[in-house]
């Protein structure tokens, strides 16, 4: 398998402090990869480098054969990186379907200001059909016309996934999808994601606190601590690694 | 004689000359930063606060013949802090968690309402040419010249002394008193301060009182520089404050001080050297004549364009910010089909009747005011686009509209262009200017965009209008604009022109609705809903914002052109001044910024409120004759400012506008009644819970997104 995402020697400094120090990370097409680490390990920093929100100090990121250096956030999104948010980010004052429709319109690039002027800017039947197909995939069809203010957190997260899927991502970044969800909701979300992924075939990079979710969901895992990769490889092996248990899971053992 | 002559002496003189006003600017900047840091309020009403004290002092001195000291105590030491306390206690304390843009709108509402309210309560009217006097006798007639280069007037020395005392006092307060320490703690980190059991409310009240005291002091000190004591001059002060404060990224008190002083000296240096340059470069002359008022705006713009760091400056905000209620859904969501159609039919019938009456029976006056209402509605649609759809605050819609008006004046009356063609060229020109203006601050949006537009509005007002190729050189010569004619229609006839305005308004309104429902409007809604999420699906917010600005400027330009044509004159000072445009924003926002109907109602209110309500025409009609209007009428038109200004204060709570809020409530009641009678079915479609309308009506969302909160709790939309 060729690497879809290839981050090489990513270093990020904030006024002298190294938040990331030579991190390498690869995601192959269609793969499910986890990125874990204790608080302050640099997960969010890495995420922001990847998305272009706060680019790395040194190092390079290649995605789908393209160098992402200097590319703005929205252009990376158009290149095929979709994402969800740790704190839910939905468009207020819109329905669930409208979320997907606007994403579809941006993806297909058929919107133009002059079409809007003469009233041709409204959603087209094929766009509505595409949105409804994704809603069905996520089991949200009953909520299609609900204003997002009415949704539960779990459903809201699914809407985020749906919105990201409309952009036909090659890689879906999930930023702590379990936060705010209870165990059964997390499992339901993971199950839906697995099904959708099997259907669409995109890769997933999961940044997560919830070790259980990472263990059950991902094929490979990277572990960050103090801005360095301390372990990577097949998830089961990584979870058994003594350094990982010491740095990250040790706390869990003490608690339990 | 310290320095002999030549350039070094000029520089020295300029520094001396610039220091007294610089000291006052520093006072203003300090007061401004104080409230910005402690409560996150970008207080545009600062100028209005300065005006209130200055006017109080002036009234006490000239009308009541009070001596200086009691007048000063009343206006600066009692009234000013009191105003600050009232603002904090009754308005801003409740807005802690509001977004910075809503706080900005609230302060704009206050800017409009406060001076008018003071004038009405104190029955104060500015008398042209009666220059306010300073806080010392013989202020502008006794001079001292310690260095033999520049004679200081007593007023200037008083400004210096007061400013130095105030700054030393502030320094001592921060250094030696417990309250000062608390303020500093809150300024450093509000969250940390609260954790240390500092009562944020008391600190906030204290800093508002202190800030208002600074405003009052500065107002009284600066008043002698103005010819007449009017509020708009004081409003300009706030831009000075922002420019000075921007030097410290709006958050550093010492740097704001330096910024203020630097600004004063900078202006004096310019005034010293520009005259010599403009002898050789004649195009500089109009700039030179107006450089003093323009410098703060130029500086502010320079900072935006050439200092990229400022664009990354964090806006001071409460950690709890960002959890304000989502704007309620569109009205269409919340009412039954029956009621929707009913409202529509009623609206069409009512408006048709009104216009029919005006067309058939209206005399010249009524045709004129109705035309004004229609044209203003068109201008207000530009606010609907930029504020209602894009969620940005623009304070230079007046300048955009004026560009339209002046283009018609220049092209049609001076070069014989087709009038309507010139109107569209003017609109396009305004669009270009709008786009260029939005470029340097496109990534920031919010408060910074608002400042940039305010700076531009004042720059346009102080400099651009004065160019002969814009405002015709001298405003006294007039800026006459002809009426167009198109085929068989001659729009010199007022009624025909009203018809033309109406048609144009409808076309623009339809376009605005199309835009809202098209890709553009949906993209804007996405950005407003969540900028990061919009980016994550490939939307470029910066670009969309620039386009939104251009569209809004186009509409304003077209409306401005039509307004000038309708009045057969640009009438810049009356129609398009920065303060006039401030009132536009307040009107639209207080009624309903998000709907075309809101713009139309704002237009109606702008042109007709005075004529129908305040002059008693409506009451007279009910009572059956103009001679029966009670003696109470006419009511001062200043009440408009108070009424709508104070309504805009509600923006933070009801961003949809009071009119829409009211409509929503009554709609819900009518719908419930209809359902009871069996004439309408409860709104269905989608699994909206039965209490959906209730929660739309009363946007009281769960505050905060506690990760441990139950997952089935509704999510609050993060804006």
Image (spheres, coloured by chain):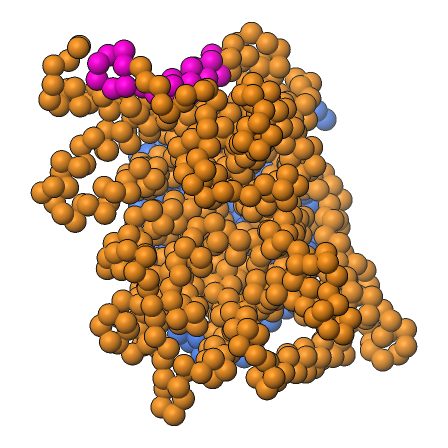
Chain colours: A blue, B orange
Residue that appears at 59% across and 41% down: B124
Is residue B85 among the parts visible in the rendering?
yes
Q: Quadrant of residue B600?
A: bottom right
Residue A219 makes an appearance in the image: no
What residue is rendered at 21% in x and 14% in y? B148
Quadrant of the rendered image containing residue A14: top left
Main SS type for the magenta part? helix
In the picture as drawn, the residue positioned furthest to the top comes out as: B176
Q: Is residue B568 above or below residue B644?
A: below
Of residues A139 and B141, the one drawn nearer to the viewer in this rendering: B141
Q: Quadrant of residue B687?
A: bottom right
Q: Return the residue found at the far bottom.
A: B488
Horizontal and vertical percent position of residue B165:
47, 13
Residue B111 point in image, percent of width and height:
55, 43
Q: Which residues are magenta?
A: B145-168
Image position, residue B203 (x, y; %): 64, 22
A156 is higher (above) or lower (below) than B206? below
For the point 39% across and 58% down, the residue is B572
> Where in the figure is residue B173, as x and y percent of width and height?
55, 12
Looking at this view, is B78 or A204 the one in front? B78
- Left or right, B487 with respect to A188, comes to left
Q: How many marks?
A: 0
The answer to whether B157 appears left or right of B528 in the picture is: left
Depth check: give the residue in front, B434 or A203.
B434
Q: Tell me the quarter of the image containing the N terminus of chain B.
A: top left
Q: Is residue B167 magenta?
A: yes
Residue at the image point whose x is 41% and y is 36% from the top: B226
Up-down: is B170 above or below A117? above
């Amino acid at each position: 398998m060729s690497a879809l995402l290839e981050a090489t020697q990513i270093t990020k400094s904030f006024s002298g402090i190294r938040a990331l120090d030579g991190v390498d990370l690869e995601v192959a097409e269609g793969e499910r990869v986890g990125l874990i680490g204790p608080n302050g390990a640099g997960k969010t920093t890495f995420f922001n480098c990847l998305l272009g929100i706060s680019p790395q100090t040194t190092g390079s990121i290649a995605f789908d054969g393209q160098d992402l250096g200097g590319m703005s956030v929205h252009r990376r999104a158009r290149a095929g990186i979709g994402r969800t948010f740790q704190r839910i980010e939905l468009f207020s004052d819109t329905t669930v379907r409208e979320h997907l429709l606007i994403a579809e319109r941006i993806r297909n690039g058929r919107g133009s200001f002059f079409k809007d002027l003469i009233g041709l800017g409204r959603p087209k039947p094929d766009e509505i059909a595409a949105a409804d197909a994704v809603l069905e995939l996520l089991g949200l069809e009953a909520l299609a016309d609900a204003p997002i203010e009415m949704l539960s957190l779990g459903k809201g997260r699914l809407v985020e996934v749906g919105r990201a899927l409309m952009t036909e991502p090659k890689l879906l970044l999930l930023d702590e999808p379990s936060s705010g969800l209870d165990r059964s909701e997390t499992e339901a979300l993971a199950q839906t994601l697995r099904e959708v992924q099997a259907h669409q075939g995109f890769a997933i990079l999961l940044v997560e606190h919830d070790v259980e979710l990472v263990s059950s969901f991902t094929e490979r895992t990277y572990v960050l601590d103090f801005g360095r990769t301390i372990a990577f490889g097949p998830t089961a092996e990584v979870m058994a690694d003594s350094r990982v248990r010491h740095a990250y899971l040790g706390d869990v053992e003490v608690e339990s | 004689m310290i320095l002999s002559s030549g350039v070094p002496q000029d520089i020295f003189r300029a520094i001396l000359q610039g220091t007294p006003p610089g000291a006052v600017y520093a006072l203003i900047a300090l007061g401004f930063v104080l409230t910005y840091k402690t409560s996150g309020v970008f207080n545009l009403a600062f100028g209005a606060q300065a005006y209130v004290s200055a006017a109080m002092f002036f009234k006490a001195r000239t009308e009541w013949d009070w001596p200086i000291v009691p007048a000063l105590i009343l206006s600066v030491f009692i009234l000013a802090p009191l105003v600050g306390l009232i603002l904090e206690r009754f308005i801003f304390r409740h807005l802690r968690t509001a977004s910075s843009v809503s706080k900005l709108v609230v302060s704009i509402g206050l800017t409009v309402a406060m001076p008018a309210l003071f004038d009405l309560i104190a029955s104060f009217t500015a008398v042209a040419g009666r220059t306010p006097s300073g806080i010392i006798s013989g202020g502008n007639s006794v001079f001292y010249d310690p260095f033999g280069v520049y004679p200081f007037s007593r007023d200037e020395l008083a400004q210096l002394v007061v400013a130095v005392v105030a700054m030393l006092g502030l320094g001592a307060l921060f250094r030696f008193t417990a309250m000062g320490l608390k303020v500093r703690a809150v300024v450093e980190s509000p969250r940390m301060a609260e954790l240390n059991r500092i009562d944020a409310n008391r600190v906030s009240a204290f800093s508002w009182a202190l800030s208002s005291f600074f405003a009052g002091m500065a107002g009284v000190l600066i008043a002698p520089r103005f010819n007449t004591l009017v509020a708009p001059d004081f409003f300009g002060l706030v831009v000075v404050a922002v420019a000075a404060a921007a030097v410290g990224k709006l958050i550093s008190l010492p740097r704001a001080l330096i910024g203020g002083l630097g600004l004063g000296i900078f202006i004096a240096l310019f005034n010293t050297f520009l005259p010599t340059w403009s002898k050789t470069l004649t195009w500089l002359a109009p700039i030179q004549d107006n450089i003093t008022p323009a410098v703060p705006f130029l500086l502010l713009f320079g900072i935006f364009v050439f200092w990229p760091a400022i664009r990354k400056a964090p806006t001071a905000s409460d950690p709890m910010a960002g959890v304000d209620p989502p704007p309620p859904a569109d009205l269409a969501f919340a009412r039954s089909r029956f009621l929707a159609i009913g409202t529509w039919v009623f609206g069409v019938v009512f408006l048709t009747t009104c216009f029919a009456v005006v067309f058939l029976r209206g005399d010249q006056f009524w045709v004129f005011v109705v035309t004004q209402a229609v044209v203003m509605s068109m201008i207000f649609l530009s606010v609907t686009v930029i504020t209602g759809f894009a969620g940005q605050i623009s304070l230079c819609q007046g300048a955009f509209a004026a560009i339209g008006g002046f283009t018609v004046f220049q092209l049609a009356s001076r070069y014989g262009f087709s009038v309507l063609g010139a109107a569209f060229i003017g609109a396009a020109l305004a669009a270009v200017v709008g786009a260029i203006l939005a470029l340097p601050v496109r990534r920031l949006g919010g408060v910074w965009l608002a400042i940039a537009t305010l700076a531009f509005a004042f720059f346009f007002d102080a400099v651009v209008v004065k160019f002969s190729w814009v405002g015709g050189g001298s405003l006294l010569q007039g800026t006459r604009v002809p009426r167009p004619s198109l085929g068989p229609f001659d729009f010199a006839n007022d009624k025909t022109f009203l018809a033309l305005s109406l048609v144009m308004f409808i076309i623009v309104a339809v376009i605005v609705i199309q835009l809202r429902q098209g890709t553009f409007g949906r993209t804007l809604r996405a950005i407003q809903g969540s900028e990061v999420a919009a980016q994550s699906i490939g939307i470029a917010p910066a670009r969309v914002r620039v386009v939104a600005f251009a569209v809004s400027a186009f509409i304003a330009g077209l409306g401005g052109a039509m307004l000038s044509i309708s009045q057969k004159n640009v009438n810049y000072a009356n129609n398009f001044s920065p303060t006039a445009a401030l009132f536009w924003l307040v009107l639209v926002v207080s009624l309903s910024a998000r709907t075309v109907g809101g713009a139309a109602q704002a237009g109606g209110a702008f042109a007709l409120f005075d004529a129908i309500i305040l002059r008693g025409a409506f009451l007279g009609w009910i009572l059956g004759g103009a001679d029966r209007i009670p003696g109470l009428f006419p009511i001062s038109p200043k009440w408009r400012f108070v009424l709508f200004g104070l309504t805009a204060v509600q923006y933070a709570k009801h961003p949809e506008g009071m009119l829409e809020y009211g409509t929503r409530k009554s709609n819900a009641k009518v719908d419930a009644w209809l359902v009871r009678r069996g004439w309408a079915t409860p709104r269905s479609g989608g699994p909206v819970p039965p209490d959906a309308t209730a929660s739309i009506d009363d946007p009281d969302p769960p505050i905060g997104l506690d990760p441990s909160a139950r997952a089935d709790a509704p999510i609050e939309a993060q804006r």
